[in-house]
Amino acid sequence: MLKLCPDCNNIGKGKHSFLSGNIYLAIIEFVAVAIILVMGQAFGSKILGLLFGIFFLIAGIKNLIDYYKGGTICPSCSYKPMLSLDKPRAQQLIKENNLTIPEETQS
């Protein structure tokens, strides 16, 4: 999904930060959950192991969802909150600055 940067008016796909939307980090977190489940009482108590497992599971799911949602950081200027093109503010900026949406992405 294409997004608009309100700072530099770049229209394109956003990029991810290191800890948000990193598919490799999500895989590592899911592997950590599997290791914690296999090891069982390695942390001295099942409750502590379960808490660590839940933490890594939630973090992995969040990273996986962020990966498929697309990035929110502008690749040109690194301005963080890029706007989805269907948002009213993005439509307003497109009209104000006379921007054109790239042909291959228009529906």
Image (cartoon, rainbow, N blue to C red):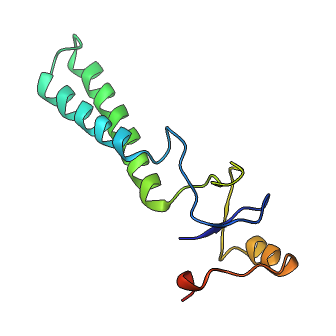
State the image coordinates of residue 91 (x, y, percent, origin top left).
75, 78
Q: Reply above or below: 105 against 30.
A: below
Q: Reply above or below: 42 against 79.
A: above
Q: Residue furthest bottom?
A: 107
Q: Is residue 105 left or right of residue 76?
A: left
Q: Reply above or below: 25 against 46.
A: below
Q: Residue furthest left?
A: 38
Q: Residue at x 66, y 74 (%)?
A: 85
In this view of the protein, which residue sits in the foreground, 7 or 53? 7
Q: Residue furthest top?
A: 44
Q: Is residue 9 left or right of residue 24?
A: right
State the image coordinates of residue 2 (x, y, percent, origin top left).
58, 70
Q: Residue at x 19, y 34 (%)?
A: 34
Q: Residue at x 54, y 89 (%)?
A: 107
Q: Is residue 17 left or right of residue 60?
A: right
Q: How many marks?
A: 0
In this view of the protein, which residue sits in the foreground, 65 or 45? 65
Q: Is residue 64 left or right of residue 78?
A: left
Which quarter of the picture shows residue 7?
A: bottom right
In this view of the protein, which residue sits in the foreground, 33 or 23? 23
State the image coordinates of residue 4 (x, y, percent, origin top left).
69, 67
State the image coordinates of residue 19 (x, y, percent, origin top left).
49, 38
Which quarter of the picture shows residue 56?
A: top left
Q: Reply above or below: 36 against 6.
A: above
